[in-house]
Amino acid sequence: MLRLLSILAVLCLCIPAYATESSAIPKLDIGKGGECVKEPQWMRKNHMHLLTHQRDEVVHKGVRDDKISLKNCIECHASTKDDSVIARDDSFCVACHRYEAVKLDCFECHSGERKSAWLKRNSK
Amino acid sequence: MLTSVAALIVLAGLYSVHMMEEHGHIITGMNNQIVWGIPHVFAIFMIVAASGVLNVSSIGSVFNKPAYKARAPLAGLLSLAMLAGGLTVLMLDLGRPDRIIVAATNYNLTSVFAWNVLLYSAMFAAVVVYLWTMMEARMQPWSKHAGFVVFIWRFALTTGTGVIFSFLVARQAYGSAILPPMFIVISFAWGLAVFHIVQSAIYQWNGKMLDEYVQKRMKNLLGVFVVAALYFVVVYHLTNLYFARQVEFERFILADGGIYPLLFWAGYVVLGNLLPLLLIYLPGWGKTQHVAVASAMVILGGFAFLYVFIIGGQAFPLSIFPGFEVKSSFGDGVIGLYSPSLPEVLLGFGGVGIAFLITAVGIRVLNFVPREIPKKTL
Amino acid sequence: MSEINVQRRQFLKMSMGVAAVSIAPGIFLFDMAHGKADANKVRWGMLIETANCAEGCNDCVTACNTENGLSGGVSSTDSQWIRKIEIKDISTGRETSLPMMCQHCEHPPCVDVCPTGASFKRADGIVLVDKHLCIGCRYCMMACPYKARSFVHEPLQNQNPDVPRGRGTVESCTMCVHRIDQGQQPACAVACPNKSILFGNLNDPDSEIATRIRTVASAQVRADLGLNPGVRYQGL
C-alpha cells in the first residue's frame, strides 16, 4: 500500500514537469498540407464534427461531398513518404491524437492510405 | 476462499474478453452460420433464471405467503446478481463492446433487442426499489406495490427474452409464438433451482436447518415448475413434428444431429427433468440434500436445453430454397459446425463468477439471510 | 409562449411517450416494419437470368471480392458477400446455378431487429450496415432468411479506401453503393460474362429491368415471407 502511494506521489510530481516539457505542438508530418476547408486552427478544433456530419450524410443519404470526405483529407495529408496518415508515430492523425490522448476510431475500418497510392498498388 | 476463486474466474473471463478484443471473434468457435455461441447460452440462462428467481418474492408479497416473504430479499439479491452477470457476458461478447454507449443512445424501436435494453435496465431499477422497500422499515408499506411492479415486469422481461427468438422468421428452430410462455415457465423452474442451491449453501455454512414445512412446500413447487416447463418443451416439439416442413429440423435436433439429440435427451430430459423429479417425489426422498442435487441437475439440464435450442437451432441450415438440394461455398444446405473455444467458455463462467461475487458480498454486507417466522404464524 | 403552455406541451409530450411505450411494441412494429415509405423515384434492383448462369463460373464472386477488398477465403469465418449456389429440385432433378447475395428487401428483417439502427434501408432501397453504429451483436445475421450477412471475425488491414470494413461489425453486399453513387453499375453485374445480372431502377417504368420483369416470368426467393426483395430471379 505504502509503495503504491509513493509511486502515485512520484507520478503526480512528474506530470507538471512532463507538461511543461512537451507543451509545444507535436511535430507531425502534414503531407502535402494546404488549406482547402478552413484554416488550420479551426480544423484542429472542429474536424471531428465535419467528419461525423459528413459520415451520416454519405452513409445514410448517399450525399457525397468530396471536399470534406475523409478520403479527401487523407489525399492531401498522407505523408509524402509512405502515403499514410497513420503508419508512423509522427503521421498526421496519429501524432496529434496521441498527444491529446484521444482514441482514433476511424482506421479500424477506413483505410489510412492515400487512394491514388492504394489504386496504384492494387491494380498491379 | 470461494470468493477468491470466483474473483479469479471473473479475471479469467475478463482476460478472454481482452483476447477477443485483440484478435476478434476468430478465437471463439462462433462463425457466420452459428453466430451466437456459448456466451449466449450462459447469458440467457442467467437472465432467464434472474427473472424466475423472483417468483419466490412474488409468492411472498403478491400472494402473501409468509414462508416466501422471509426469502424475498434473498431472491431479489440473486436476481440482481444473475442479471448483472448475464448482461455482462452479453455485452462483452459484442463485436464492438467499446461501443456500448451507441446501444444506449441509438434506439431502433422495432428491435426486440432495444426493447430488452429497456426491459433489463428497468428490471434492475425495479428490483433495487423492491429490495429497498423490504429492507427499510419506513418503506415497508410500499413493499407490496413494489413487489407487484416487479411481478408484472418480470413477465414482460422473460417475454422479451423469448421474443428475441420467436420473432425470427429466418430459422426453423425459432419463429414460434409458444417461445415466450415457454421461457416464462422455464424461468420459474431454473430460478427456483438456483434459489434452492443458494439457500441450502447458506444454511449449510451457517449450520442451520431449513424448516421442514418450508422445505416441503418449496420442493413441491420446484417439482411442479419442472413438469410445467417440460410440458411446454414437449408441445413446442410436437407442433414442429406435425408440420411437414419442420420434420427435417426435428429429425436433426431429436435424432440425427449428433451432440444435439444427445444433449437434449440425456442432458435435458433425463438429467434435467426425470432424475430431479424422482429425487423430489420418490417416497422417502425429497430431503434437503436430495432437493439440492435435484436443483443442480435442473440447472445443468437448463444449460443442455439452451445449448440445443440456441446452437443446435442455428446449426441447422436455413431453408432458402425449400424443396431443393442446395450447395455452396457458404455452408448452404450443410449442418453448421461449432466447437466452443476456451475464451468464450471462460467468458461465460466469468459471468457466473460475477453473479456469485455479488451474491456473496451482498449476503455478507446486508441482511439477506432468510429469517424464519415462528411456525404458528404460518 | 407562456410558461403554462410550455408545461402543458411537456406534459403532453411525456404522456405521449408513456402511452407509446405501453401500447406499443405491436403498433410500432407494424407501422415501422411495414413502413410508409413514399413512392420513391428510385429503387435499385437486379434481375438474374439463371438460364445463362453457368455452373462453376465464379466471375461475379471474384469481381465482388476484388472490388470490396474481401479475402476470397471460404472458411466459415470468412466474409462472403456474394456466393454461387447450385440447387437441385428434389422432386424433378432439375439443376440450376445462381448467385445469392443480400436481396435488398423492401421489408428487411435485419433492419427490424437491429437494436441501434445500424442496419438500415436507403431511400433508393439499398440495405446497408452503418458500421459507425454497429455494435456487433449479430442479431441481423440471425434474422436474415438469405444468410446474406457476414461478421468480420478478425482485424483487417489494407481496405479499399472506397469500402471501409472492420473487425467486430457485420457486413453484406452493398450493391456496390460507392459505384452506384458515381453512376456506375455493381461490380458483379459488370463482371458477368453472360450478362446474366441485369441491374437497374425497378421504379422507373422505362428502365430495361422494369420492362423485362413486366414481360418475362421472374420470382423472388422465399417470396412466401413477404419481404419483397429487390433482387429477382428468372427461370427459378
Image (tube, rainbow, N blue to C red):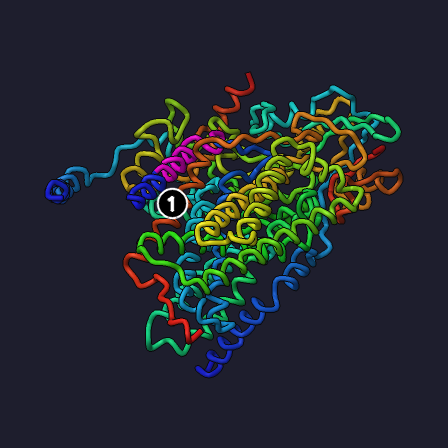
Where does residue C175 sit, x and y in percent of width and height?
65, 36
Where does residue C62 sit, x and y in percent of width and height?
65, 23
> Extreme top residue here?
A124
Say which chain tag 1 marks: B
For the question of whether residue B83 can be seen, the reply is: yes
Left or right of B108 in this view: C32: right
Q: Is residue B19 shown in magenta?
A: yes
Q: Residue at x 52, y 34 (%)?
A: C165
Vertical order, B217 against B32 (above or below): below
Judged by its main secondary structure, the magenta piece is helix
| Element at label 1 | helix
Where does residue B329 sit, x and y in percent of width and height?
66, 25
For the question of whether residue B112 can be seen, the reply is: no
Vertical order, C32 against B44 (above or below): below
Magenta residues, start to end:
B12-27
Q: Quadrant of residue C105?
A: top right
Where does residue A15 sit, x and y in percent of width and height?
15, 42
Report the residue marked by disc 1.
Answer: B353
Left or right of C64 in this view: B340: left
Q: Is residue C23 shown in magenta?
A: no
Q: Residue at x 48, y 52 (%)?
A: B291
Q: Amino acid at mark 1?
A: Gly
Left or right of C23 in this view: B119: left
Q: Which quadrant, please, contains the C terminus of chain B?
A: bottom left
Q: Quadrant of residue C84?
A: top right
